[in-house]
Amino acid sequence: MAHEHKLAIFRGLVKFKSNTQKIWGVLIFLTIVTAVEVVLGILKPESLMGQVLGMKALNWIFIILTIVKAYYITWDFMHMRDELKSLRRMVVWTAIFLILYLIFILLQEGGYVFDVYKDGFIKRDF
């Protein structure tokens, strides 16, 4: 017997009558998030160029918006919402761990490379 997919997004705030409407709704949401990223990338507002936790605030906004898009692609288009709770947790926690690890590598190695180019010598020898 076919399993009926849930037809709501944003934790039930927006409900749709069919799967086709839901797909279009999620696509429109992802398009809006992408448009915000593109506009911010083109304008690069000076107010978002300050340092926050080792990176520009604008870069953090890009990372957060990319994670939001990845979440909705996985949650709605890949039907993760309809899976068992244990499988959802396994996928989500693994992704969160990997994203945090990649951000750590980005900050650690990016800062090191920046310092080498800025000062012209190697500060740490592993």
Image (spheres, rainbow, N blue to C red):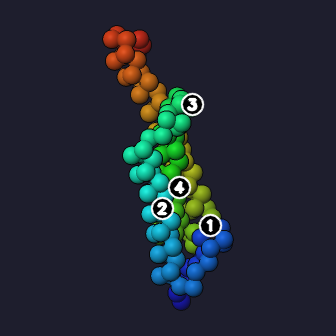
**As displayed, is residue 65 above or below residue 120?**
below
Q: Position of residue 114 (x, y in %)?
A: 39, 22
Q: Position of residue 64 (x, y in %)?
A: 53, 48
Q: Amino acid at mark 4?
A: Val
> According to the image, label 3 marks what residue?
53
Measuring 47% from the left and 69% from the top, which residue is drawn there? 28
Q: Mark 1, residues whose alpha carbon is within 10 Å: few (<14), some, or many (≥20)?
A: few
Q: Nearer the viewer, residue 59 or 102?
A: 59
Q: Amino acid at mark 3?
A: Leu
Measuring 45% from the left and 47% from the top, which residue is drawn there? 40
**As displayed, is residue 64 above or below residue 90?**
above
Tag 2 secondary structure = helix
Tag 1 secondary structure = loop
Horizontal side of 77 relative to 81 (left or right) equals left
Tag 3 secondary structure = loop
> According to the image, label 4 marks what residue?
68
Q: Mark 3, residues whose alpha carbon is within 10 Å: few (<14), some, or many (≥20)?
A: few
Mark drawn on residue 10: 1
Instruction: State which tag comes first along the sequence, 4 or 2.
Output: 2
- Label 2, label 1: how far apart the Cα atoms are: 15 Å
